Image: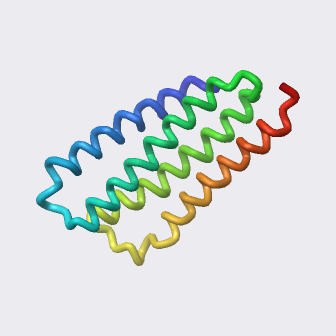
Amino acid sequence: MKKGILAITTFLGGLAVVIGALAAHALKSKLSAHDLDNVHTAVLYQMMHVLAILGMAAIPFLSAKDKNRIAGLFLTGILFFSGSIYLISIFGVNAGSIWFITPLGGLLFITGWFYAFWKIFRSKN
């Protein structure tokens, strides 16, 4: 797996902790319970997929090309899914203007997981 992908991934892991802490403390009184719950969901999915990318990097029988494809799907999913939720919940962007981005991010997560499944299932190891 490319060094740049791992660097971005670890940065996003740290960012998830920072956003989660900000939401739990500094933003708690500024955001509605609904928005706080949404931010929590975004942080959870971001961190889950950061850990998934790091885990995929450790699978020896996946090719570097496949690891990079999976990481690309997950990283783009984080950007679209979690990023759009942060924009809506923290920054007040109108959800109606970016309604399609969040489910597209979810679709990228699903695609990444099933691509990983397929490559692991088809592996000769």
Could you tell whether 79 is left or right of 58 in the image? left
**Residue at 54% from the left image edge and 52% from the top image edge:** 77
Compare residues 2 and 23 and report the one nearer the observer: 23
Q: Where residue 23 sits in the image (x, y, percent)?
A: 23, 51
What is the tally of numbered marks visible in this picture?
0
Q: Quadrant of residue 59?
A: top right
Q: Where residue 44 sits in the image (x, y, percent)?
A: 41, 48
| Quadrant of the rendering where the N terminus is positioned | top right
Q: Where residue 98 sits in the image (x, y, percent)?
A: 44, 70
Q: Quadrant of residue 19?
A: top left
Compare residues 28 and 88 and report the one nearer the observer: 28
Could you tell whether 30 is left or right of 3 in the image? left
**Residue at 34% from the left image edge and 39% from the top image edge:** 15
Q: Reply above or below: 23 against 14.
A: below
**Residue at 32% from the left image edge and 68% from the top image edge:** 93
Q: Quadrant of residue 13?
A: top left
**Residue at 72% from the left image edge and 22% from the top image edge:** 60
Q: Where residue 123 sits in the image (x, y, percent)?
A: 84, 32
